[in-house]
Image (tube, rainbow, N blue to C red):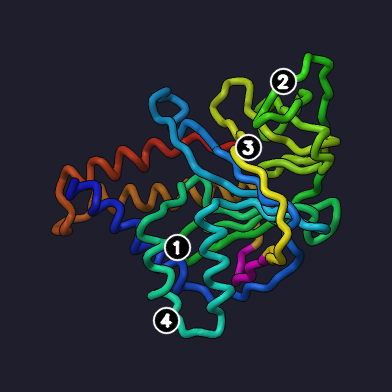
Amino acid sequence: MITSLKIINLFFVLTIISFSGYSQEITPIDTIKYDIEYRYTFLQDSNNTLSIKEQIMALEIGGRVSKYKSKNGLTDDSILFVNRNKSFGEIMQIIKPQLSKSHTSHFCNYTIYKKYPKKQQLLFTGPISPKQWMSFIEELDFKWALSSLPETLVLGYKCKTAYLVYGGRKFIAHYTLDIPISEGPYKFCGLPGLILKIHDEDELHCFEAIGIKKLNEVKPILLTKKDYIAGSQKDYILGKKARTEELLRTFIYQQGSSYSEETKAKAVHNLKSRNNYIERF
């Protein structure tokens, strides 16, 4: 138990560093109309069928743009925005309980804004290290193939099926015309209804809606601006892999640290298993 707590504390410290390392500006860009929660299930290690991980993600859909991020991350954004006029120390006292009880996977600590900055574009932002963040813009141009398969039920909604080849994988999507919004989890969109479930054909990555809420109160979609470096999806993944290698070297070669050999061995095993990104290059 102590070993696990030490590893958790290490990543908690790295999270604190990520908050303190860069100045950031959070501004409203739209108002949430729908809040969709997805359970994202994936294999962290594509070579190990027992390496199943799960993260609750959320899609905020507005009148003009949408925002997709881990549920934990959206909570952090809201806390930072509400307390934006407070000092860093005051904010950390408020946000520390949230950070200490929640964890966002290495594979899920990004943000995607769809139909932003332009209608046919998406903006992707995410950390490649605690003090280095990357952003890039992609065009929204998915080539869906609609299927005539019988409808399936997801979360009580009748869903049609569509196929997509993207990021080196073939995906199967289930979307509902009962919510005629061309949106979905991660980068996926462009169908005539909301995507409630989508997975790749090998079922290494699966997004499934677990909650749909139509908002009546006014709640903003928040845009976080940092000192980003420009890149691409490939650059982002390579940067994440380089950071993992850096952490591996730290644990393998570090001498005289307060971490036991057992702790370091578990951390090394966890880091080495980080190989199954959604998009393959």
Residue position for label 1 = 130
Callout in the foreground (2, 4): 2
Residue 32 placement, left or right of 94:
right
Residue position for label 2 = 152
How far across and down, in percent of the image, does residue 144 sit? Answer: 82, 29
Mark 2 surroundings: few (<14), some (14-19) or many (≥20) residues within 10 A: some
First reached walking from the N terminus: tag 4 or tag 1: 4
First reached walking from the N terminus: tag 2 or tag 3: 2
Report the front residue among 171 and 251: 171
Q: Which residues are magenta?
A: 222-229
First reached walking from the N terminus: tag 2 or tag 1: 1
Question: Could you tell me the amino acid type at mark 1?
Answer: Pro
- Residue at 63% over, 28% down: 199
As measured in the structure, the alpha-carbon distance from the residue carrying label 4 to the one carrying label 1 is: 21 Å
How far across and down, in percent of the image, does residue 127 sit? Answer: 53, 58
Label 1–label 3 contact, CB within 8 A:
no
